Image (spheres, rainbow, N blue to C red):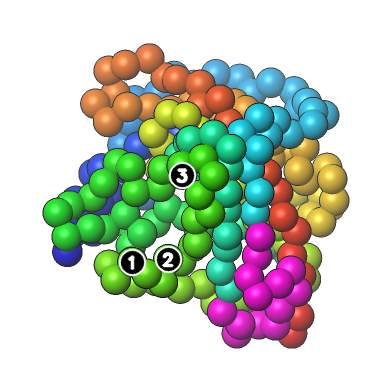
Amino acid sequence: MASLDAVKGAMIVAVFLSAGGALAEGVTRAVTVVTPSKQEQLDPDNSAGMTIDILPGEEFAIGSKVGFRVGAQKPGYLVLVDVDASGKVTQRYPNLYSMALPAGASEKANLVQPGRIVSIPDNFNPFAHFEYVAEAPAGKGMILALLSPKPVHVVDLPDVPQDMVGTRAAVAFLYDAAKRLRIADRDGKAPLADPNWSFAVKSYSITP
């Protein structure tokens, strides 16, 4: 099994270019700080034709085990981000455990192939020892699926303002933020790259 430190070193991060942006723990990159653009009210681009389903359904109780099924019509590197009922944004996939393989961390661990449904967690992968369990707060939330043709494993997105949670404005807010993400290479030498995201959203509701 690859060590967690080795997995961290193999992760490629997409950074949010703003004065308040922060990199994921354990990842250091040199970035140029720029002023964020004004929030754009845009329809999310899903040129890869992504689909996302929540298992066992879109409503579940605190303590329930939850999974995801994601498909796409184009290949790309998948990132799943959770927005809970308080607006807190947390990356759910990939994670240190999903990337850990006996031979070491794989840059392609989150690569999705066209026409193939990916189950997360993957119960057929004996090395991915993790599961998702619904926790408080109860209420409405959403899962964002981001797909990039370029290798990327970590995203840095801001929390959603409380008054936007559960509304279309929340989707527009995060889509605008995602479009301003740039991918930094491991060495920090290459120019920051545009991820060219495809973007899909699925809402859910957690009951007490």
In the picture of the structure, the residue carrying the numbered disc 2 is: 122
| Callout 2–callout 1 Cβ contact below 8 Å | yes
In this view, the residue in front, 34 or 183, is 183
Please rate how many residues cluster around mark 3, counting C-alpha atoms within 10 Å: few if below 14, some from 14 to 19, many from 20: many
Secondary structure state at the residue bearing disc 1: loop
Kindly report the distance in space between the C-alpha atoms of the residues bearing marks 2 and 3: 13 Å
In the picture of the structure, the residue carrying the numbered disc 3 is: 112
Q: Is residue 155 above or below residue 83?
A: above
**Residue 206 at x, y = what percent?**
73, 75
Amino acid type, residue under disc 3 in the picture: Val
> Which quarter of the figure is the N terminus placed in?
bottom left
Residue located at (69% from left, 21% from top): 37
Residue 176 on the magenta span: no
Residue located at (75% from left, 74% from top): 59
Amino acid type, residue under disc 2 in the picture: Asp
The residue sitting at the top extreme is: 191
